[in-house]
């Protein structure tokens, strides 16, 4: 089942539920982890912005039927972008639509007509126009009035800069999707243009980042919408146009001759030539050379990386730096990342990232929230990489850029994941000739590295069925089946085998979490538990928790500076309700966790948190850091778990009791 199918299944499951659905129940229903469910929720809510499709309550997840119907209507009408959804209904959305109306009406617009179209009073429109004046001032544009007519004046290029900036602001509520660009510029059919652009770039030996390509398409749409294009066929529809020759610059040899236009465009860059040919083919326009050069720069800087298998495009400085950082990362987090192809791809990305940073260009990433929420440890590895690069080159990275790095690292780690140890199971199959032994052979052959049938039960009267096993597989419904039972057919179908595979995955998670629970609880101690910590913000909270660690001689004075530095790179509040601040290096004298639980939340950047776990680890506990980090984010990622801790952890004994129950629930 694909990720999209599971997301749809989650929506349907929540819609059919009679009340809130606990995360564990949703995970079991889909055959995935609770972390995966959180990722699905994050992506579904991201796609439904500015609405919140799925809400998280202490009792579990729920869907508001009215919100669902609204989101479904949007999807059916194709209104997927934040810009399209606003429709002028909110002040920010109205400002966006107002500026768009002014930029596409060179003769001006009647203010009374505008007020009627936006269903607002004349006084409200005048207030909006005041905001427009402030917004357009940095772009060298002005609003002029002649009676009731208002008009936007200024150079065409500055108008385009304004449109691009406003579109990004509006899309920031969600993501600058291709549907958003296409809907806003509905008169320009960008679909075929995008498809041919990707094909042409791939043939030229480039890796195309389609998540960043939409930024470039926005620039293309804005350029095509301008009124200073040098050629368009008479109908205004795509067609073949004759491209005029262009004279050489006066200071070049042969300035008295006229070079064919295509030759000069090709000399700018291969990308300029590609964009020029596609613009003439799909839109029937001949773009000015200056515009082509600008679009080629945007394309090359934002969405393309040269894929040279021989490595000739890898600069020695970047190659050496990435290798040093990855080596340090392996040592710091006890990982095995050594792989030349991974290093090559990562170096290409870092090289491209550096070039864009120098130009002040940063890409948006639609998966940032999901990556950060669902894969916090992988995101943490990316933060480490970006911090080292930042210190070396003095460039800053947004969370979106960090998430792109995390996607590189996560894909590589996933490919290198080794199969876990085999799961022992009891197979229940009533005696019928050789059916039971045959089924045992089928299952062990299908899952030979992951499953071993330790007990074969052919009589249903046996007691303690599967009590000591990690998994029970049965061909018949059992009256008192253990929770970890999977029912399949005697001759298993593909769906049955998928169910067994999910059961094995859950058994492995239970095994790992039982071991992790003991390790995690061992890092807590009474002197490091803080109830209702008084702190004005995250920096103050971090300092108080650090002082608790320092009093016990666990960390030195540098520790708090390193934790605050990590916080500046990217917030450690991975979801509303909890934060896990930490240093980037493991220099504690011994490993410990300072934990604060507050009835009233602490402001943590753009989030509010009730649980703060400052983790400090020593060099000898590197592997334990990864486990503790993952366990904390897994447990605290459920809002109901945070509320439970706030309610029950009134003292240290209550903390251990509540946390033990939560960790045990995760193993069930």
Image (cartoon, rainbow, N blue to C red):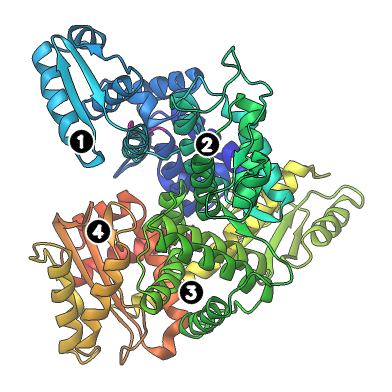
Query: Earlier along the polypeptide chain: callout 3 or callout 4?
Result: 3
Residue in view at x 55 percent, y 64 percent: 349
For this view, does 289 lie left or right of residue 444? left
Label 4 residue SS: helix
Residue 288 has which mark? 2
| Spatial CA span between label 2 and label 4 | 63 Å
Of the residues under marks 2 and 4, which one precedes in the sequence? Answer: 2
**Is-magenta flag for residue 49?**
yes
The label on residue 515 is 3
Q: Is residue 103 above or below residue 622?
A: above
User: Quick check: is 242 in the magenta stretch?
Assistant: no
Q: Quadrant of residue 359?
A: bottom left
Helix, strand or loop at label 3? It is helix
Q: Which mark is residue 32?
A: none
Q: Residues within 10 Å of mark 4 (few under 14, many from 20)?
A: many
In this orientation, which residue lies closer to the viewer: 663 or 360?
A: 360
């Amino acid at each position: 089942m694909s990720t999209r199918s599971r997301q749809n299944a989650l929506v349907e499951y929540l819609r059919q539920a009679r009340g809130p659905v606990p995360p564990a129940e949703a995970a079991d229903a889909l055959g995935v982890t609770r972390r995966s469910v959180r990722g699905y929720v994050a992506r579904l809510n991201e796609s439904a912005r500015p609405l919140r499709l799925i809400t998280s309550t202490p009792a579990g997840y729920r869907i508001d039927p009215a919100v669902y119907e609204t989101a479904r209507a949007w999807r059916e009408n194709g209104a997927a972008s934040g810009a399209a959804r606003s429709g002028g209904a909110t002040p920010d959305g109205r400002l966006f639509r107002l500026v768009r109306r002014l930029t596409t009406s060179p003769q001006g617009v009647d203010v009374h007509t505008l007020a009627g179209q936006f269903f607002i009073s004349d006084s409200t429109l005048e207030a909006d126009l005041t905001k427009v004046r402030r917004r357009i001032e940095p772009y060298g544009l002005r609003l002029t009035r002649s009676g009731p007519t208002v008009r936007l004046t200024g150079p065409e290029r500055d108008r385009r800069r304004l449109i691009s900036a406003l579109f990004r602001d509006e899309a920031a509520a969600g993501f600058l999707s291709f549907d958003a660009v296409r809907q806003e510029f509905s008169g320009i059919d960008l679909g075929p243009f995008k498809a041919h652009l990707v094909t042409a770039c791939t043939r030229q030996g480039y890796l195309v980042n389609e998540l960043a390509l939409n930024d470039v398409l926005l620039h293309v749409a804005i350029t095509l919408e301008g009124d200073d294009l040098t050629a368009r066929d008479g109908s205004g529809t795509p067609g073949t146009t004759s491209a005029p020759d262009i004279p050489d610059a006066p200071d070049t040899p042969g300035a008295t001759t006229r070079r064919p236009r295509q030759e000069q465009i090709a000399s700018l860059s291969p990308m300029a030539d590609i964009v020029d040919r596609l613009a003439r083919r799909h839109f029937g326009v001949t773009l000015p050379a200056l515009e082509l050069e600008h679009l080629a720069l945007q394309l090359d800087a934002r969405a393309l990386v040269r894929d040279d298998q021989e490595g000739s495009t890898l600069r020695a400085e970047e190659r050496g730096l990435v290798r040093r950082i990855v080596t340090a990362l392996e040592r710091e987090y006890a990982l095995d990342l050594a792989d030349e192809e991974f290093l090559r791809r990562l170096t290409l990305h870092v090289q491209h990232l550096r070039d864009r940073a120098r130009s002040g260009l940063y890409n948006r990433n639609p998966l940032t929230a999901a990556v950060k929420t669902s894969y916090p440890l992988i995101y943490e590895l990316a933060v480490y990489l970006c911090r080292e690069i930042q210190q070396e080159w003095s460039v800053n990275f947004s969370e979106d850029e960090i998430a792109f790095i995390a996607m590189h690292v996560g894909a590589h780690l996933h490919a290198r994941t080794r199969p876990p140890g085999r799961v022992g199971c009891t197979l229940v199959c009533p005696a019928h000739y050789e059916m039971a032994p045959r089924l045992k052979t089928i299952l062990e052959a299908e899952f030979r590295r992951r499953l071993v049938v330790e007990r074969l039960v052919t009589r249903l009267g046996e007691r303690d069925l599967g009590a000591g096993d990690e998994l029970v597989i049965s061909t018949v419904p059992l009256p008192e089946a253990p929770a970890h039972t999977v029912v399949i057919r005697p001759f298993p179908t593909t769906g049955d085998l998928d169910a067994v595979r999910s059961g094995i995955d859950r058994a492995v998670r239970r095994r790992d979490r039982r071991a992790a629970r003991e390790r995690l609880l061992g890092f807590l101690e009474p002197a490091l538990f803080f109830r209702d910590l008084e702190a004005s913000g995250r920096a103050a909270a971090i300092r108080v928790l650090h002082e608790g660690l320092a009093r016990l001689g666990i960390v030195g004075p540098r520790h708090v500076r390193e934790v605050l530095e990590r916080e500046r790179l990217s917030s450690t509040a991975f979801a509303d309700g909890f934060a896990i601040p930490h240093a980037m290096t493991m220099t504690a004298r011994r490993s410990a966790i300072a934990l604060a639980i507050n009835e009233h939340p602490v402001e943590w950047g753009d989030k509010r948190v009730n649980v703060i776990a400052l983790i400090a680890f020593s060099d000898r506990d590197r592997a334990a850091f990864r486990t503790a980090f993952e366990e904390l984010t897994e447990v605290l990622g459920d809002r109901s778990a945070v509320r439970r801790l706030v309610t029950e952890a009134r003292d240290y004994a209550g903390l251990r009791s509540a946390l033990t129950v939560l960790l045990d629930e995760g193993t069930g």
